[in-house]
Amino acid sequence: MYENYADLAKKIRKHCLHMVHIGQSGHIGSMLSVADLLAVLYGGALKIDPQAPERPDRDRLIFSKGHAGAAVYAALAEQGFFPREWIDTYDQNGGKLLGHISHYVPGVEFSTGSLGHGLPVAVGMALAARERGQKHRVFAILSDGDCNEGSTWEAIMFAGQRHLSNLIAIVDYNRIQALGFSKDILDLGDLESRVAPFGWACKSIDGHDYGQIAAALQEISPLDSKPTCIIANTIKGKGVRFMENQVHSHYWHVTDEDLARAMKELEE
């Protein structure tokens, strides 16, 4: 099973590099760091159906780090939510795939871009689902920058107080933001110890270890009384060594040479 996750993650990374190259825009470092998480989620953890993307009982995933939306597009394309040819239209005039994630794309629940919006929306969805007696789960993927926003912490407090056990927040904790290392901008420190006191069940994992990711998701019980926060320790630019842990990978414009070099690395 984990070989399948690795294969999907590699395809996600390749699609992301291709999209950023043809669009000459995007946030490749952020896309690469979240690829393994998305591979496990879209590789079987999420209850979704590409043939019926709006079925009422589907799990919802809110991708709060909308600047890395190409990674979600790549996963959705591989799972058959839309033709892979759409990837060639990324961030192009008249194209199907906008630079920041868009709900007009099949399989995308909510458009994001400005940080701090995703978790509050997910909290509202989770609360509404519980009030309606619906059994689906709501996932939110957050970035370091999301965790700097006051609206995120308001949502954390609210979800804990309301015991929204159908809510799963996953932090892509790569410790780099647009203009520097997170510790130098707004140090989040031990994120688990900050979130847990608000009534969350928290777990820290290696966000590139498919076994740990899958286990963390499988351990969530519908009988739990708390929302879940999975803090996935990741590496910005993961999978392409010359981009890894580089601040400027956030805005890296991928040249022809960069693309060829990165694709070669992914095949090694």
Image (cartoon, rainbow, N blue to C red):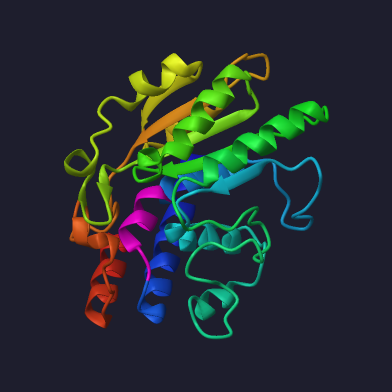
What residue is at 45 percent from the left and 67 percent from the top?
15
What residue is at 67 percent from the left and 20 percent from the top?
222
Image quadrant where residue 234 sits: top left
Please indicate, yes or no, whether residue 177 appears anywhere in the rendered image: yes
Image quadrant where residue 30 sits: bottom left
Image quadrant where residue 211 sits: top left
Q: Position of residue 96 (x, y in %)?
A: 60, 76
Total numbered labels: 0
Start and end of the magenta stretch? Answer: 26-34
Residue furthest out toward the bottom: 93
Is 29 on the left-hand or right-hand side of 90?
A: left
Quadrant housing the C terminus: bottom left
Q: Which secondary structure dominates the residues rendered in magenta?
A: helix
Whether 205 is drawn above or below 88: the answer is above
Whether 46 is drawn above or below 260: the answer is above
Is 69 on the left-hand or right-hand side of 43?
A: left
What residue is at 47 percent from the left and 70 percent from the top?
99
What residue is at 26 percent from the left and 79 percent from the top?
255
Q: Position of residue 192 (x, y in %)?
A: 36, 22
Question: Is 159 in the magenta?
Answer: no
Q: Position of residue 23 (x, y in %)?
A: 41, 79
Please indicate, yes or no, whether residue 45 appears anywhere in the rendered image: no
Front-most of residues 263 and 88: 88
Whether 64 is drawn above or below 193: the answer is below
Question: Is 28 in the magenta?
Answer: yes
Q: Position of residue 262 (x, y in %)?
A: 27, 67
Is 227 on the left-hand or right-hand side of 19?
A: right
